[in-house]
Amino acid sequence: MKLVKGSGKVPVIYTAHHASHDFHKFDSRVALSEEQKIRFSDYGTDLTVPTNGLASIIAEHSRALGDLNRDPNDPGRFQTQDYGQPIRHDIWRAGKELTEAEKTDCQTTFHQPFHDEIISQLTARRGPTFVVAWDNTAHYRIGDYLTGKHEMMRPFILSNRGSEESGEAGSNEPVSCDPALLELLAEKFRVELRQRGLPDEVHLNFVVKGGYVCRRYSTLCNAEELHALGVTADIQSLQLEYDTAITHDQITLEPYPDKIIALREAFNAAITQCL
């Protein structure tokens, strides 16, 4: 992982946990082409991640070596196929899949240090602090598209584990950040996006509800574990998912530098106004 110090203007720790497509020592066993490896990552999130927080923690390994936005006990953190549509591709060459021992090694080498760094950042805090999971998704169907229960990816989705198109809690679990904060952030973000000529369609908890980072790093959701780990500050978390069609050509993967900068600056401005 890479730790990038921010300006400290807002008390936010950003995580770009799917930013890399690097398979490290396992690369020769990978069946994916170089392009497919890139598409399996949240390519460009290391460039769009905001710079106004306390720090950004950026992954430097492919999510195939242990998805950092999944629970460490979730067997699905080691995917065997990518998310290609309409056909998913095998990640590993036949007979070259990760062994159980290698999965344990990846857990120790990649997953645990990443989350230890988040905890280290949070234990140093005394005032209210926010964790923002920074993700993107290709311009394709999200949800269970194989069963027909799907929607096309929208330009932006802000999530706090709440009810669809609302920041309020659903019936099954608490929210990871104050609903009023999520709704205010959406409002401010729309304005900032519009001013920069970017799509201003921002949804709340639309299909994407927020993953492990949201669930874990919030004292609204997980106070007991965080306190046991030495976190004494009030912590809230949320997730942003954006459509990569905004920042990259979906055929060639060519980046749009001006839009990358505009997206980063729009979120910088919006969250600064909120916090």
Image: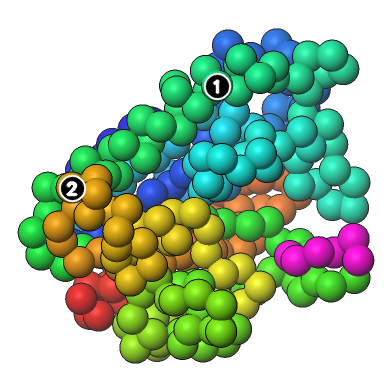
Per the image, is 222 magenta?
A: no
On screen, residue 240 above or below 108: below
Query: On the picture, is 33 further left or further right than 71?
Result: right
| Discs 1, 2 touching: Cβ within 8 Å | no
Query: On the picture, is 51 further left or further right than 107?
Result: left
Part of the protein shown in magenta: 142-147
Instruction: Report the colour scheme.
Output: rainbow
**Residue at screen point 76% across, 47% down:** 83
**Residue at screen point 66% across, 73% down:** 207
**Residue at screen point 52% across, 35% down:** 20
Label number found at residue 155: none
On screen, residue 129 above or below 159: above
Q: In terms of secondary structure, where does tag 1 sit? A: helix
Label number found at residue 230: 2
Query: On the picture, is 226 further left or further right than 231?
Result: right
Image quarter of residue 175: bottom left
Residue type of the residue flagged with mark 1:
Thr
At label 2, counting other C-alpha atoms closer than 10 Å, the crowd grade (few under 14, some 14-19, many 20 or more) is few
Q: Is residue 10 visible?
A: no
Q: In terms of secondary structure, where does tag 2 sit? A: loop
Residue type of the residue flagged with mark 2:
Gly
Image quarter of residue 75: top right
**Residue at screen point 25% across, 80% down:** 274
- Reading the chain from its start, which is encountered first: label 1 or label 2? 1
Q: CA distance from mark 1 to mark 2?
A: 26 Å
Label number found at residue 104: 1
| Coordinates of residue 230 in the picture (x, y in percent) | 18, 47
Dividing the image into 4 quarters, which one contains the N terminus? top left
Image quarter of residue 77: top right
Q: Is residue 136 visible?
A: yes
Dividing the image into 4 quarters, which one contains the C terminus? bottom left
